[in-house]
C-alpha cells in the first residue's frame, strides 16, 4: 500500500484520538481472559468452603466426571494387537521396539526398556514425551529413560501423535512435518476434533491409557507398582491420564502444573491437546487434576523461570496439599523446584528418581548415572522411521472425519422433519456457540464526521459485550430509502469503506454501517495474529490461541461476535430504519448466519465467499486455517451451517462464491430442475450437496425466489448486481 493511500485510510479510524482506546487491539484476549477469571474466582470460593474429607471426596468425584465430559467419551477398548518388531540387547538392559493399536488401525510406536537381569516382578513406568519432534528418542529424554532402567524400573516410552515416528503431516521429501513443530501437528487436527464434540486430548490420552494396558500385559511388570512421568507436553499427559486411570499408583508431572489463571495471564491458551472444551467454564482448574488422584503419590516437578508460571505452581501445591492432609497422607504429595527455564535439571531428575524409588518400593541410589545414548538406528522403531511410510495407519484426522460423517448422517435424518429440526437447530446453536443476548440500552459515542459527495460518514463506537468497544462507520445517504445494511469483513472496516459495493449501496439510498468486530481492524488481533502460525501455511487473521480461549469457557468467537452484530442491528432499527440487511465476508459469514438465525430483525442476508459447512472443515486435512475462527465447538452434534441457512427461510438469502474448507469454489454442474418437478435433482458435487437442504426448505415454503445461490461463482458479474433489489 502506498504511503499516500495509507494516510488517506487513516481518516476511517475511529479510536486513534482516544488515548484509552487507541491501543485496544488486544481487547478480545482481555475479554476472554476476564471471563475465564470470573469462572476461576467462583471456583476459588468453592474450594475455600471445603473443610472435611467427605467434601473433598465429593470434589474428586466431580473433578473426574467433569474431566471425562470435557475430553469426550473414550473409544472402545479393543485388542492392542501388539507386535515386537525388534529386540536389542545392551549392557544391563534389553530394548524391545513395539507397535500396538490404541484403536483399530491407529498404531502407536513405542519402546520397552527392561533391566537385566530381573530377579522378580519389577515396577513399571510409562514415560510421556514432551513436544520434541523426535519424541522420546531425543537425548534429554533418553537421559531419564536409561537412568530409570539402570535403577531397576521397566520403562515403556511411546510416541505422542504428531511426534517421533507418528507425524501426521509428513513431507516425505524432507522427512519433516509440513506444518511445522509438534504443537502445530496437534493444532492442525485439534480444532476439527472440537467441531465434532471430541478433543485432541481424547486421542492422546487414550494412547497413554492403552500404553498402561500394554505395560500391565507384560509378565515382568508388577501391576501394583505402576508410575507415569513426562515433561512439558508429557507433563500434560501425565496430569490428564493420572487423574482418571486408577491403575497408576504414582505420577510425577514435570514442567506443566501451574493454574489456569497464571497460565492465561503469562502465556495464553497453549496448543490443542492442552485445551478442553468448557473446562474453565465449568470451574475446573489445574489443581483438580491432582485433587482427583489423592491420596495416591504425586510429585510436582517445577522450574522457577518456566513459562508455565511458577506462582501458579506454588498456589496449586498449597491448595492440593489440603486434600492430602485431609486424607492423612501429606507424605504422598510433594513439589520440587529448581532455578531453570522450561527445562530438565539434574536436581529435579534425581528428586523424581527418589520419588519413584520410594513410592514404587524399589529402593536404591537416586544419584543420576552417566548413560550411553542409543544411536538413531538403535532407537528407531519402524523400518522407515515413520509410521505413515512403513505401513498404512489411521490418523486423528481420518478417525475424526469418519466420526463427523456419522454426525452428519444423523443430521440428514433429522432434516427429514424440518418443522421439528430447525427450531432445535436455533436453540442448540445459541447454546453451543455461547451466544449471549446483548445489552440493547448501550448508547453510541459520536467521534467525528467525514463529508463525501452525495453522502456523509459518521464515526462512532459503542460498548461491546464486555469491556471493549466496537468502532464503526455509518454511511448516511443524502436521499435515504429507509433501509440499512450492516456490512463486515475480517479485514476490517477500512478495507470496505471505499469499496464499490458499499458506495453503490449508499448512493442507492441505503444507510451502511461498517464495524470492526472484535478482533478485526482497530480491535485486533494484536499480538495474536496468525500470519506465521504454521510453517508454509499462511494464516491471515487470528491465530488459534484466541479461538482456544473461547473454547475453554464453553463459548465461541462466533457466538460472541453474533451478540455484537445483533446489538448493531437493533441500533439501526431504533434509528428509524424500516429494514436491516446483513452482508458478511469469508470466515465472518458464520457470524452473520448465527446472528440472523437468532434475530428476526435481520431481514436479508448476503454471504460473500463463505465456506459451505463445518462438515467440510472436518473433511479436509489441509483446510484453510483462517476458517477456524468461524467454527463452533461441538456444532456437528446438533447442526451445521446449511441448517442455519435453511432456518432463515423465507427471508432473502444470497450466497456467492461459495467454497469448501480448502477455499475451492463450486465448479461442478448446476442443479437442474426438470419441468413440473417439485424438487431438484440430486446435487452434482460436494458443495451442491451441502446446500441441497437449504434449497429444499426455500422450495417447501414457496419462496425459492428469495434464495440466490450463485453456483457459477462468476467474478465477472459485479457483486452489487446481486444487491440491486436492496436499493429499490
Image (cartoon, rainbow, N blue to C red):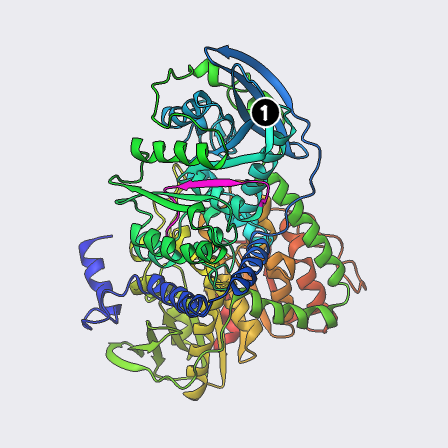
Q: How far across and down, in percent of the image, does residue 424 sit?
A: 67, 70
Q: Is residue 705 left or right of residue 577?
A: right
> Looking at the image, which is closer to me, 545 or 552?
552
Magenta stretch holds residue 81: no
> Looking at the image, which is closer to me, 249 or 482?
249
Query: SS class of the residue under badge 1?
Result: loop
Q: Can residue 504 be seen in the rendering of this structure?
A: yes
Q: Which residues are magenta?
A: 245-258
Q: Residue at x 43, y 42 (%)?
A: 253
Q: Residue at x 72, y 73 (%)?
A: 702
Q: Can residue 607 be seen in the rendering of this structure?
A: no
> Looking at the image, which is closer to me, 719 or 571?
571
Q: Is residue 445 left or right of residue 617?
A: left
Q: Please tell me whether residue 724 is drawn above or below residue 353 in the rendered image.
A: below
Q: How far across and down, in percent of the image, does residue 9 sit?
A: 24, 63
Q: How far across and down, in percent of the image, does residue 504 sit?
A: 40, 70
Q: Which residue is mark 1?
A: 121
Q: Please tell me whether residue 564 is drawn above or below residue 297 in the rendered image.
A: below
Name the main secondary structure of what is drawn in magenta: loop
Q: Is residue 413 left or right of residue 279?
A: right
Q: How far across and down, in percent of the image, does residue 425 sit?
A: 64, 68
Amino acid at each position: 500500500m502506498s504511503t499516500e493511500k495509507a494516510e488517506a485510510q487513516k481518516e476511517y479510524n475511529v479510536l486513534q484520538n482516544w488515548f484509552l482506546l487507541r491501543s485496544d487491539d488486544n481487547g478480545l484476549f482481555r475479554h476472554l481472559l476476564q471471563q475465564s477469571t470470573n469462572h476461576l474466582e467462583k471456583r476459588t470460593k468453592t474450594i475455600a468452603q471445603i473443610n472435611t474429607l467427605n467434601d473433598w471426596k465429593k470434589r474428586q468425584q466431580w473433578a473426574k466426571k467433569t474431566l471425562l465430559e470435557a475430553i469426550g467419551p473414550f473409544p472402545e477398548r479393543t485388542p492392542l494387537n501388539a507386535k515386537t518388531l525388534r529386540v536389542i540387547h545392551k549392557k544391563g538392559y534389553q530394548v524391545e521396539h513395539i507397535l500396538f493399536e490404541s484403536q483399530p488401525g491407529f498404531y502407536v510406536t513405542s519402546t520397552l526398556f527392561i533391566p537385566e537381569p530381573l530377579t522378580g516382578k519389577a515396577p513399571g513406568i510409562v514415560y510421556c514425551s514432551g513436544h520434541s519432534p523426535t519424541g522420546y528418542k531425543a537425548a534429554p529424554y533418553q537421559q531419564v529413560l536409561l537412568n530409570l532402567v539402570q535403577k531397576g524400573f521397566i520403562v515403556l516410552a511411546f510416541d505422542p501423535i504428531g511426534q517421533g515416528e507418528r507425524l501426521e503431516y509428513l513431507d516425505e521429501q524432507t522427512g519433516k512435518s509440513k506444518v511445522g513443530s509438534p504443537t502445530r501437528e496437534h493444532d492442525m487436527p485439534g480444532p476439527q476434533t472440537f467441531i465434532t464434540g471430541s478433543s485432541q486430548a481424547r486421542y492422546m490420552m487414550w494412547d497413554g491409557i492403552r500404553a498402561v494396558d500394554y505395560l500391565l500385559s507384560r509378565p515382568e511388570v508388577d501391576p501394583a507398582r505402576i508410575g507415569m512421568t513426562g515433561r512439558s507436553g508429557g507433563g500434560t499427559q501425565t496430569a490428564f491420564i493420572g487423574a482418571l486411570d486408577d491403575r497408576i499408583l504414582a505420577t510425577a508431572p514435570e514442567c506443566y502444573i501451574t493454574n489456569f489463571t497464571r497460565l492465561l495471564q503469562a502465556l495464553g491458551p497453549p496448543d490443542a491437546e492442552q485445551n478442553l472444551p468448557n473446562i474453565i467454564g465449568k470451574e475446573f482448574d489445574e489443581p483438580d487434576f491432582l485433587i482427583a488422584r489423592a491420596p495416591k503419590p504425586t510429585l510436582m516437578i517445577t522450574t522457577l523461570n518456566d513459562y508455565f508460571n511458577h506462582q501458579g505452581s506454588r498456589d496449586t501445591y498449597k491448595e492440593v496439599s489440603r486434600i492430602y492432609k485431609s486424607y492423612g497422607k501429606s507424605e504422598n504429595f510433594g513439589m520440587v523446584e529448581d532455578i531453570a527455564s522450561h527445562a530438565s535439571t539434574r536436581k529435579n531428575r534425581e528428586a523424581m528418581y527418589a520419588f519413584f524409588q520410594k513410592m514404587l518400593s524399589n529402593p536404591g541410589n537416586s544419584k543420576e548415572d552417566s548413560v550411553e545414548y542409543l544411536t538413531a538406528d538403535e532407537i528407531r522403531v519402524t523400518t522407515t522411521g515413520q509410521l505413515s511410510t512403513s505401513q498404512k495407519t489411521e490418523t486423528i484426522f481420518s478417525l475424526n472425519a469418519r466420526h463427523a460423517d456419522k454426525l452428519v448422517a444423523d443430521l440428514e435424518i433429522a432434516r427429514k422433519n424440518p418443522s421439528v429440526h430447525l427450531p432445535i437447530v436455533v436453540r442448540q446453536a445459541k447454546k453451543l456457540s455461547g451466544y449471549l443476548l446483548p445489552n440493547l440500552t448501550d448508547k453510541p459515542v459520536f467521534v467525528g464526521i467525514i463529508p463525501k459527495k452525495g453522502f456523509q460518514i459518521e464515526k462512532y463506537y459503542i460498548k461491546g459485550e464486555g469491556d471493549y468497544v466496537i468502532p464503526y462507520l455509518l454511511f448516511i445517504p443524502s436521499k435515504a430509502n429507509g433501509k440499512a445494511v450492516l456490512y463486515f469483513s475480517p479485514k476490517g472496516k477500512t478495507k470496505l469503506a471505499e469499496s464499490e459495493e458499499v458506495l453503490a449501496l449508499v448512493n442507492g439510498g441505503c444507510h451502511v454501517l461498517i464495524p470492526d468486530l472484535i478482533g478485526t481492524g482497530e480491535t485486533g488481533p494484536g499480538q495474536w495474529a496468525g500470519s506465521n502460525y504454521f510453517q508454509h501455511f499462511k494464516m491471515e487473521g487470528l491465530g488459534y490461541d484466541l479461538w482456544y480461549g473461547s473454547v475453554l469457557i464453553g463459548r465461541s468467537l462466533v457466538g460472541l461476535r453474533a451478540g455484537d452484530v445483533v446489538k448493531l442491528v437493533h441500533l439501526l432499527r431504533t434509528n428509524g430504519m424500516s429494514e436491516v440487511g446483513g452482508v458478511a465476508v469469508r470466515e465472518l459469514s458464520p457470524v452473520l448466519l448465527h446472528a440472523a438465525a437468532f434475530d428476526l430483525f435481520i431481514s436479508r442476508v448476503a454471504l460473500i465467499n463463505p465456506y459451505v459447512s463445518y462438515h467440510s472443515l472436518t473433511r479436509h486435512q489441509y483446510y484453510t486455517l483462517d476458517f477456524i475462527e468461524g467454527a463452533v465447538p461441538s456444532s456437528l452434534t446438533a447442526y451445521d451451517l446449511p441448517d442455519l441457512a435453511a432456518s432463515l427461510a423465507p427471508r432473502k438469502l444470497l450466497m456467492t462464491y461459495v467454497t469448501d474448507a480448502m477455499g475451492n469454489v463450486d465448479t461442478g454442474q448446476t442443479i437442474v430442475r426438470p419441468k413440473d418437478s417439485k424438487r431438484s435433482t440430486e446435487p452434482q458435487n460436494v458443495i451442491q450437496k451441502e446446500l441441497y437442504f437449504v434449497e429444499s426448505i426455500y422450495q417447501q415454503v414457496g419462496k425459492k425466489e428469495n434464495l440466490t445461490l450463485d453456483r457459477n461463482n462468476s467474478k465477472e458479474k459485479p457483486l452489487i448486481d446481486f444487491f440491486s433489489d436492496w436499493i429499490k
